[in-house]
Every structure is written in structure tokens, then in C-alpha cells.
Image (cartoon, rainbow, N blue to C red):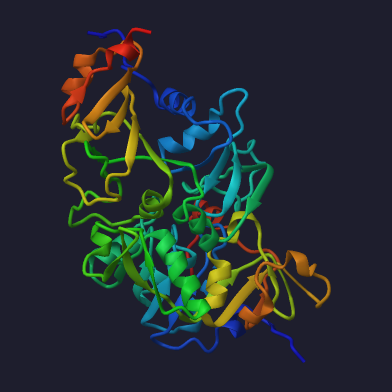
Amino acid sequence: MNQQSTQIGRTREQMAQRLALDIPDGSYVNLGIGIPELVAKFVPDGRELIYHTENGLLGMGPSPEEGQGDHELINAGKRQVTAIAGASYFHHADSFAMIRGGHIDLCVLGALQIAQNGDLANWSTGEPDAIPAVGGAMDLCAGVKSVYVITQHCTKQGEPKLVESCTYPLTGLGVITRVYTDLAVIEVTPAGFQLIELSPGIKFEYVKERTGAPLLPIPQHVAVK
Amino acid sequence: MINKQVASAAEAVADVFDGAVIMVSGFGEAGSPIELIHALIDQGSRDLTIVSNNCGSGEVGLAALLKAERVSKVVCSFPRTANSTVFPDLYRSGKTKLELVPQGTLAERIRAGGAGIPAFYTPSAVGTPLAEGKETREFDGNTFVLEHGLRADFSLIKGRSADTHGNILYNKTARNFGPPMAMAGKISIVQVERVVEPGELDPETVVTPGIFVDRVVGVPSPAHESELVAAGATYP
């Protein structure tokens, strides 16, 4: 199926755009490294969002024009960004007071694995030769009001990232409430992974086969609008 | 008379001793005091413990200090970098030990150390390998892990402007770890592009008050790490 198309489901940009639709007006939002960085490009019309980057900026704007950047105005992924009107700079202890102190409404992280109970593993594969690096992910999981994940549904090797329980070292326990993938939008509920939306052209069975834990179908009252 | 300005980066780091604990500001290249680090490489002290968010890139700055095998331990949140094998090689060979700390815990340990707080409870890392073996305690039904404040013998910091009293202003996201590290260093050394007389900085805009700063050194045109790395530069 779908043999003519190389792209199945949403692209990274489309995933970021889809997630941005669900961010309420006026939110303070932290964006992690990787696909989460792309979310900053897609503020829906009519909404004002303030993006926080852990390295000391509230009011992060898009990438600068070529040659207009500042080496010392960067995001968590260490890429150059801009500051919007109304932005502020602050030091790291204040930045993580915002994070840990529950002042940030939402953060968007990448993932290695998400368990059906909302556990997240995203900092280490635990391999003996790997260089461990954690950054701010554990603090974000500990303190931000809502934590969403944006990730490919499966690894490059085709292994499911949504699993019954994480086998990699954990970043946070029971904190993930939403997962946005190339294939679907999934809510993490007390009953497990709950499908709430399929990407265009994607069938339920296709997602279910690529999910490493039970996947509840879209509830009827949602599907039949 | 208070005048914290010293003539050169070499003079600023001259008394660093073997085995010293040194905090180094910066998040990626933003706020990394490359000229102070290069002066430390020239100065020659060994067996250093470095407290810094990252481990540098390429073979300049912090990565060059590591490459020179002058660092026995790093306390760090994100030592991995896309364009440097210096730390991974040292880590895998066992020459440099790593204490991995969540970034917010690192920032708060530094702030606490500088504020006279020996330890504190944090929710970060509870239930993960980075909290294993650490004391925990319940508050209001939630579990927190005990983390200890950090002090340093020396802090090396990059600011943008200073007066001779040591009041510091920073540049954008280069502020990052500078203010808490200035508090936590027994001797805090700040390189800035511009050193001015007292009264020239608006007290309302001072970020790090001079009481936390011991030495100020003018480095009018600091190098940018990414440009050095792109040019294939190494140090020394």
C-alpha cells in the first residue's frame, strides 16, 4: 500500500504544525531539542504563545535571516534564534525555577520510548559505550504542567517507540499526556494509549501494528461528529 | 580603592592550583569564556574538576582543556556534542570521570552553593538512574531527592560589560550560568568586552552585583567557538 509515496503520514514539519494547533492561546511553552524546535514556526493565527528556551529566553522567535544572527542568541538545540518584542533574558537558575516551579504551561519533548502509563525515556539507550547526556529533560518532566511528546512513531529500525513499559533509563515517571507522531495523535490515559486522531491516509490497523502496547480506537462519539 | 580589573587573562588565572574545582560558564558557545580557558591551558594546572553545562566543541576552549588531559572530572548535564570526540574519547578511556547532573539541578546546586545553602530537595530525576543511591523525602505526598550545593575554587565567566567594581552585564542567552557561578566561586573571574568606570553602568540594569566578582579582565573581541571550530582551529 502507498507504494508511490515515500512519505507515509505526516512529515516532521506537519507533525509540529499539528501539535501547535493544540496549544491554547497565551501559553508559556518550552520546546525541547529536535522536532520540538520546529513547533516554534507554527503559531496558529490569532494566538499568542510565548516560547521558553531553557538557556535563558522567554519570547523565542524564529531563526534569524542569513547573516543576521547572534552567536549568543541560541535555543536549547544551540541553533541561532531571535527574540520577539516583549522577550526577556535570565540566568539558568531562574530559567529552571520557571520550569521546576510549575510556571511553564506546556513542554514538548522528543522521545526514545513512551510507556502506556506515561513514563518517558529520552536521554540514554543505556548502552555501555554511550555518552550519557540528560540536559534539562528531567527538570521539565518534574515541573511543567503538561508534557507532550513529538516523535516518529517507530525508530529507524522499525521498533515501536510507544511501549508497554520503557526498557531504556527513565527521564520522568507518568508525565506524558499526549504523543504526536507521523501516524497519529495519541492520548495517554489511565486505560492506556487512546487514539484520538489518525494522520491523513493512515488506517487504525496500521498504527496498531506499529504500537508496542494496546491501542484504544477513537471513541465513537468523537469519530462521528 | 576597589579596582578588580586585571591586565590580562594570564594574570587573572595565574593562581589556579592543581586539583582545583573550576566552574566554567556557557551553554554551547554562548557565554563560554574561551580566552580565560586558553589562558588556563597556558597556565598549566592539572587534575582539575570542571563544572560546566557542556564539554566544548571541536578542539578549542573547554574541549582543548580536556584534550590537554588537564581535567580529571567533569560535572555536567550534556557532555555530548555533534562535532567533538574529545570528551567521548577521554570518558571511554577512563581518563576523565563524569558526574552527570540534570541541567536544572546543576544550576540550582550552583546557586545554592553560592547562597550558603548546603543541600536542597528537588523533584527532578526522582525515580530515574540519576537519583539512585540519593536520600529522598516526601513532602505533601510527593517524593523529592536531596542534592548538594556546589562551590568552586574559581569560576571562569564571560560577560559583556563590567565596571571596575565588578558589576556585570551579559549578552542575551550568554548570561546562562554566569550569575550563579559568580556567586559560587571563591574567586570569580569575568572576561568582558568592555570595562568601564564606576557610575557608567546603570545600577538598575546590573545583573551580577560586584560583590560576587573578584577579577575582571577586558577581552575586547572574544572569539566565537563555532567560528574557530569551522576554521579547524586547535589550541594551543
Q: Is residue A13 left or right of residue B85?
A: right
Residue B39 seen: no
The residue nearer to you, when weighing A70 against A121, is A121
The quarter of the picture where the N terminus of chain B appears is bottom right
Question: What residue is shown at x 38% (from left), y 61% (from top)?
Answer: B77
Q: Position of residue B153 (x, y in %)?
A: 48, 84
Image vertical order of residue B56 relative to residue A79, above or below: below
Q: Position of residue B199 (x, y in %)?
A: 83, 75
The residue nearer to you, when weighing A43 against A74, is A43
Image vertical order of residue A219 relative to residue B135, above or below: above
Question: What residue is shown at x 45% (from left), y 88% (from top)?
Answer: B17
The residue nearer to you, when weighing B224 against A30, is A30
Question: What residue is shown at x 48% (from left), y 68% (from top)?
Answer: B235
Residue A77 seen: yes
Determine the residue located farthest toward the front in the rendered image. B140
Q: Position of residue A67 (x, y in %)?
A: 65, 41
Q: Position of residue A90 (x, y in %)?
A: 60, 58
Determine the residue located farthest toward the bottom in the rendered image. B1
The residue nearer to you, when weighing A154 against A29, is A29
Question: What residue is shown at x 21% (from left), y 69% (from top)?
Answer: B133
Classify residue B176 by image quadrant.
Answer: bottom right
Image vertical order of residue A135 relative to residue B45, above or below: above
